[in-house]
Amino acid sequence: MLDTVDAGKLFLVGKVWDIPGAAHLLRYYAGAADKIPGETLKMAQRMHGYTLMEPVGVVGHIVPWNYPTTMFFFKVSPALAAGCTVVVKPAEQTPLAALFYAHLAREAGVPDGVLNVVPGFGPTAGAAVASHMDVDKLSFTGSTEVGRLVMKAAAESNLKPVSLELGGKSPVVIFDDADLDMAVKLVNFATYTNKGEICVAGSRVYVQEGIYDAFVKKAAELAKKSVVGDPFNPRVNQGPQVDKDQYKKVLKYIDIGMREGATLVTGGKPCGDKGFYIEPTIFTDVKDDMSIAQDEIFGPVMALMKFKTVEEVIQKANNTRYGLAAGIVTKNIDITNTVSRSIRAGAIWINCYLAFDPDAPFGGYKMSGFGKDMGMDGLEKYLQTKTVVTPLYNTPWL
């Protein structure tokens, strides 16, 4: 309920996806907490050596507003399992869930000072966490622009290591042999989930020319059926944008798309006369250099583009400064192997999308950041390696 009130997220989706997923992730890392081994070293000298994996110390987490619960547990769960203490700075738009989880942690017996939540604005509270001399590690999820500021603050303070999960402009590639109805539904899900306020939104959609026209028609029909409204209503498919600023930003990009020459197929307007609701929007005749094909909009806007060959679409998919995720829809295993190895992105989803799992590391290439969440990779970034060496006397072997 707090995420719905704060962020306009669908209550039903939170109930069946976000909250169970957060609990599952916490249990995953609870199971990993006693499985952090070091190594015995085969020394060349008469020495016995081994490594210890130690907690990095105090971790500062700066989390975004689009998935308040999910991102809280993405960050906190592995850091606690590694033995670190954490300071969480939730987004100023959505602080309530993080405060509530701090309350639950205290009720669960987590000692005072282990899990700390500091709400506030980015330039004040966020900057204080990023530049604090007693914070040993930073993990940030948000925009590329703010990610630069976080890195600068870390460098200018105590050179704390930083992991960043930043923006995305993820391609979804649909080949001629795809099941058309399945592909249309998958792309609708990839683009409009969470009203498009998701870093891996599949908002650049490349459709092979043989099915392009049929795909556009069916995609527009499905988008028009979407119910936009009260996120507490279980019959609603899309809630409001998080706030007025984001609402205005999305509408501005829709206007830019039309002015740059893209064709508005459906949507493109506010829904109703109050609130921050926007119709699911589809553009065709999109060129790769248009703003709506290059910039992360973070709203319900789909850019549809046509392609002919595998080589062409690989080039188009990689024509972005981001590299967070990508989707491929085809029945051809050879195409799958070629394209998945050619697209520069941290997660490739084949005939599916948003296929997150606690055991699957997630993070970006290029300007989408570095460092992984989830999986054992997500735990290891909160550890540091210590080498311990002692001399051996009268040993019969080395």
Image: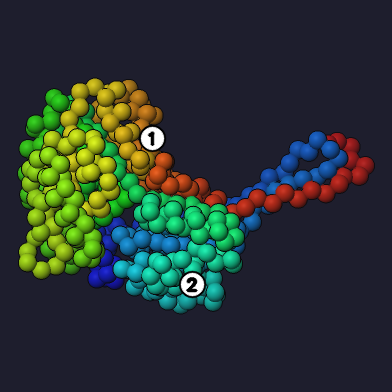
Residue named by callout 1: 344
- Disc 2 marks a residue whose amino acid type is Asn
Residue 230 position within the rendered picture, expressed as x and y whole percent measured from the top left: 14, 66
3D distance between C-alphas at marks 1 and 2? 36 Å
The mark closer to the camera, 1 or 2, is 1
Residue neighbourhood size for the residue with mark 1, other residues' Cα within 10 Å, grouped as few (<14), some (14–19), many (≥20): many
Q: Secondary structure at mark 1?
A: loop
The residue lying at 86 percent from left, 40 percent from top is 46
The residue lying at 35 percent from left, 42 percent from top is 322
Residue named by callout 2: 116
Q: Is residue 125 above or below residue 149?
A: below
- Disc 1 marks a residue whose amino acid type is Arg
Residue 385 position within the rendered picture, expressed as x and y whole percent measured from the top left: 65, 50
Q: Earlier in the sequence, mark 1 or mark 2?
A: 2
- Name the one closer to the observer, 79 or 396: 79
Q: Which image quarter holds the N terminus?
A: bottom left
Residue 356 position within the rendered picture, expressed as x and y whole percent measured from the top left: 36, 48
Judge left or right: residue 113 versus residue 177: right
Q: Quadrant of residue 133?
A: bottom right
Judge left or right: residue 222 versus residue 18: left
Q: Which image quarter holds the C terminus?
A: top right
Judge left or right: residue 99 versus residue 252: right
Q: Secondary structure at mark 2?
A: strand
Do labels 1 and 2 touch, CB within 8 Å?
A: no
The residue lying at 40 percent from left, 73 percent from top is 119
